[in-house]
Image (cartoon, helix red, strand yellow):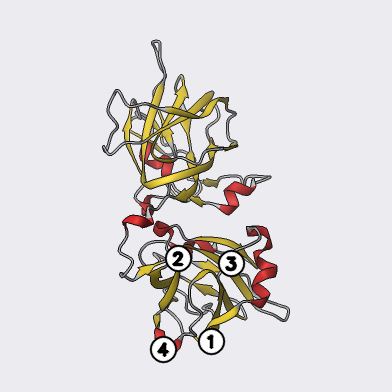
């Protein structure tokens, strides 16, 4: 059997780079209902890795496809699936990916959203259109930007009338009600689930910086931030926006799974940013103060730096993680207390 990978999408829009994929199962997002997934279960549509095509692979229901695929509809109507987000989130865009679906892709799709406390929203819930009906092509990526500041809990993907979709990517950011959080409790202010996100980076050849902020420990070497081998002077870096301004009391850096390629040393600079835009942060960061002095790391282990190892910078909103000269880190935790 031959395994054929998906084509790399061209002209990736800014929202698909700047925001996280909220559909990642590790964030708690899951498909909770579908009208039909006879040929391929709807859960595959949210798999984090790119879709593949495996020649000559069949199961009891037909050709094995890496995505969601319904039966050929023989009556009026259309198929749909409902996805419950891991947490209330603001949606900035989607990628409707039909990779490897050619004669069986969904010809058109639309996406709606709602707010519900239920696992599966009630039948009388109000659904709001985020993406109007859009024509799709086979074996293609369809990026759609969304202009909404509402925090949604569920999405409904409608396909007309039937067919398949390899992946649904949901780009956006968590919406956190910090007024309900205990201000005296130490919180990982950089965590994805608390609204932390990577803004800019020097290199992400093998793994993106957003992996640093994901829940749990890395599952393998690909589940972290890793740069290409540096062949010129300098060092690699990434800038991270905290989910909320706060004072950092403990930093944890995990090099899990990185052995012959872990970052040899690291340091962290930080600032309380009150002006400019995300695009201006790299130039601002040149002048940020040192939070964690340059320190040596080692392979495949957790390093914890208590408050007495950190410089007191007061409340901060952004950090720049520097690695010397290059390499990989699996996770970064910035525990602190939120401030006003």
Label 4's element?
Answer: helix
Q: Which quarter of the figure has residue 204?
A: bottom right
Residue at disc 1, secondary structure:
strand
Q: Residue under circle 2?
A: 190
Alpha carbon separation for disc pair 2 and 1: 19 Å
Label 3, label 2: how far apart the Cα atoms are:
15 Å
Instruction: State the residue in front, 329 or 170.
Output: 170
Between 253 and 100, the one lying in front of the other is: 253
Disc 2 is placed on an element classified as loop
Residue to which mark 1 is pinned: 293
Give the mark, 3 or 2, whose residue is nearer the N terminus.
2
* Residue drawn at the location 50% of the way across and 27% of the way down: 110
Q: Which residue is mark 4?
A: 308
Q: Earlier in the sequence, mark 3 or mark 1?
A: 3
Crowding at mark 1 (Cα within 10 Å: few <14, some 14-19, many 20+): few
| Mark-to-mark CA distance, 3 and 1 | 20 Å
Q: Residue at x 72, y 81 (%)?
A: 233
**In contact (CB < 8 Å): disc 4 and disc 3:** no
Q: Position of residue 305 (x, y in %)?
A: 41, 84
Q: Which residue is mark 3?
A: 273
Examine the rendering and report whether any part of residue 260 can be seen: yes
């Amino acid at each position: 059997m031959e395994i054929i990978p998906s084509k790399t999408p061209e002209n990736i829009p800014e929202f698909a780079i700047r925001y996280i994929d909220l559909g990642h199962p590790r964030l708690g997002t899951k498909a909770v209902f579908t009208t039909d997934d006879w040929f391929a279960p709807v859960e595959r549509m949210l798999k984090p890795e790119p879709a593949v095509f495996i020649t000559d692979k069949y199961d009891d229901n037909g050709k094995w496809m890496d995505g969601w695929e319904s039966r050929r509809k023989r009556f009026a109507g259309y198929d749909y699936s409902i996805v419950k987000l891991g947490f209330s989130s603001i949606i900035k865009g989607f990628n409707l990916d039909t990779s490897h679906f050619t004669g069986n892709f969904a010809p058109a799709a639309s996406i709606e959203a709602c707010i519900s406390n239920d696992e599966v929203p009630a039948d009388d819930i109000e659904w709001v259109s985020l993406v109007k009906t859009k024509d799709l092509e086979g074996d293609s990526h369809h990026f759609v930007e969304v202009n909404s500041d509402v925090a949604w809990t569920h999405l409904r993907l409608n396909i007309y009338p039937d067919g398949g979709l390899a992946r649904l990517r949901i780009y956006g950011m968590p919406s956190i009600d910090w007024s309900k959080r205990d201000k005296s409790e130490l919180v990982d202010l950089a965590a994805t689930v608390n609204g932390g996100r990577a803004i800019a980076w020097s290199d992400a050849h093998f793994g993106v910086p957003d992996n640093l902020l994901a829940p749990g420990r890395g599952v393998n070497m690909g589940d972290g931030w890793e740069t290409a081998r540096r062949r010129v002077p300098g060092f690699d870096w990434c800038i991270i926006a905290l989910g909320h301004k706060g004072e950092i009391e403990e930093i944890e850096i995990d090099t899990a799974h990185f052995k012959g390629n872990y970052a040899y040393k690291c340091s962290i600079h930080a600032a309380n940013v009150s002006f400019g835009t995300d695009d201006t942060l790299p130039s601002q960061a040149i002048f940020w103060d040192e939070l964690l002095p340059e320190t040596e790391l080692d392979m495949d282990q957790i390093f914890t730096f208590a408050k007495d190892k950190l410089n007191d910078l007061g409340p901060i909103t952004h950090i720049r993680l520097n690695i010397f000269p290059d390499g990989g880190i699996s996770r970064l935790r910035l525990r602190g207390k939120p401030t006003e």
